[in-house]
Every structure is written in structure tokens, then in C-alpha cells.
Amino acid sequence: MTPPVPPHGVLTAAAAVLSVTAAALAWGEWVHWTADRRAARLPVEPLQLAEPSASAPRIAVLVLGFGNPGRHPNLVNRWRARMAVRTARGAERRGGSATIICSGGAVRGTTSEARHLRAAVRRSGWGGPVVLEESSRSTWQNIENTRTALEDFDGIAICSNGLHAEKARVYLARQDEALARRLVRADCYRFGEMTFVKPVFAAVGLRKLRRLRS
């Protein structure tokens, strides 16, 4: 028995949905990729191999928390933790030392975002130093409350999804121009990583950046 063929209108609607979905996913990847290209223009000197007579450059990897009402790190915090770990390992491969600073208070739950990030960082295999900042309730405060700690480092890499990290770098420049000159590129972007959420973060991030710059 031949299976029934869906009506032409159903096939057309399904094709339209698939096309729109594919376009949205491609746009989300493109927005995050372009944010990564802008980050590539940051200073990179602190991540170069140290001279034999010089001490190894110290890199702060600041990872920003995301609202996390549950008892365990959610999908976004695990994503950002992976960024932090590969950025820290990259700094070490280039001859530096790295400390991961997890920033975020208990905004949507009883456990701070910083603690969720630390748990995810450890599960990602990072055994190096981790510092917690657990009072921040906004991106501005993420920067404000870690500035004193950041002063001890030669380079500063900020880890989050592309446009959020870009906003945090703008905030650092507004709060402390001297520290902003120590910014280095973080290893945040991976093609195909978290593709299905990138359009959402792209739309929200672009809107917030436009508001910030206006």
C-alpha cells in the first residue's frame, strides 16, 4: 500500500520553516564570528612567549556567569566554562600562566553563578587556580567587582558569548582605561558550538550593544 503524500501546502510550509530556521542559525553563527574577528584586534603581546630572562606573563581569564536557578551548572554556564578552560590552556601553551576568575552572584537561585562556573570549569579538566567573585548582579558589576583582582595580571581575557564579552570589554574601558589596555583575545568562538542558542544571544547582544553605544 502506497503511503499517503502530504498536501502540497504542508510541504511548502515545512520547507519554509526549514529555510527560516537555517537562515537564523547561519545568521547567529555569522554574528558571533564577526564578534570574534573584532576581538582578534585586541592587544596580543602578553600572550607571546616570554623571553628566557623574563618571568612568564600572568593572564587573568575572567568568565562571566549566566542566570542559573538549578543546583547544577546549566547549559550556558557549561559553555562559558569551556571557553575559559581553552583560553587558559592557550595562554599556558604560549608560555604564560593563567588564573580563571569566575564572576557572578546568586541572581536566580541560591547558588552563585561563580560557583556554578567553578564546578563546570573543574569538570572541563582545569586543575589550575580559580578565583570566585560572588556578589555581581550585572555585567557592569562583573567588571567593577573584579577590577582589583585584575590589576595583578599582565593580560585580561574575558570569556562569554561573543557580544556579551564585547559589552564587558566596553565596560572595562569605561571603568579603567589602563586595565583595558591589557585586554587579550579569549578563545570563545567555535563554529557549530551551541548553534541553536546563538541566534537568541545575537539578537539580544546586538540590541544591548546598540543601546550602549548610543
Image (tube, rainbow, N blue to C red):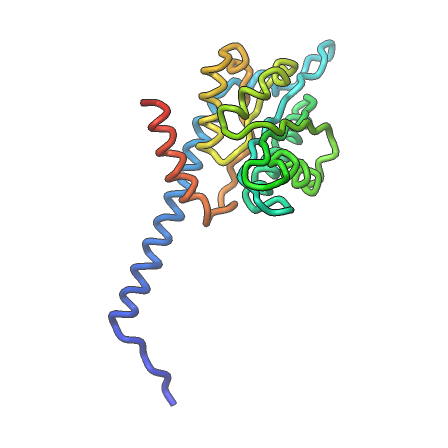
Among the 4 quarters of the image, the one containing residue 207: top left
Q: Where is residue 69 drawn, in percent x and y?
A: 57, 44
Residue lying furthest bottom: 1
In the rendered view, tell whether residue 209 sits above or below residue 42: below
Viewer-nearest residue: 28 or 144? 144
Using residue 117 as the reference point, say whether residue 144 is left or right of it.
left
Among the 4 quarters of the image, the one containing residue 60: top right
Q: Where is residue 188 drawn, in percent x and y?
A: 53, 34
Name the residue rendered at 44%, 29% in the picture.
37
Viewer-nearest residue: 52 or 194? 194
Q: Where is residue 46 drawn, in percent x and y?
A: 60, 17
Q: Where is residue 97 drawn, in percent x and y?
A: 70, 22
Name the residue rendered at 35%, 59% in the picture.
18
Quadrant of the snapshot with the C terminus = top left
Viewer-nearest residue: 142 or 202? 142
Name the residue rendered at 46%, 21% in the picture.
171
In the rendered view, tell whether residue 72 sits above or below residue 170: below
Residue lying furthest left: 9
In the rendered view, tell whether residue 108 sits above or below residue 144: below
Name the residue rendered at 60%, 18% in the picture.
155
Total labels: the figure holds: 0
Among the 4 quarters of the image, the one containing residue 10: bottom left
Residue lying furthest front: 110
Quadrant of the snapshot with the N terminus = bottom left
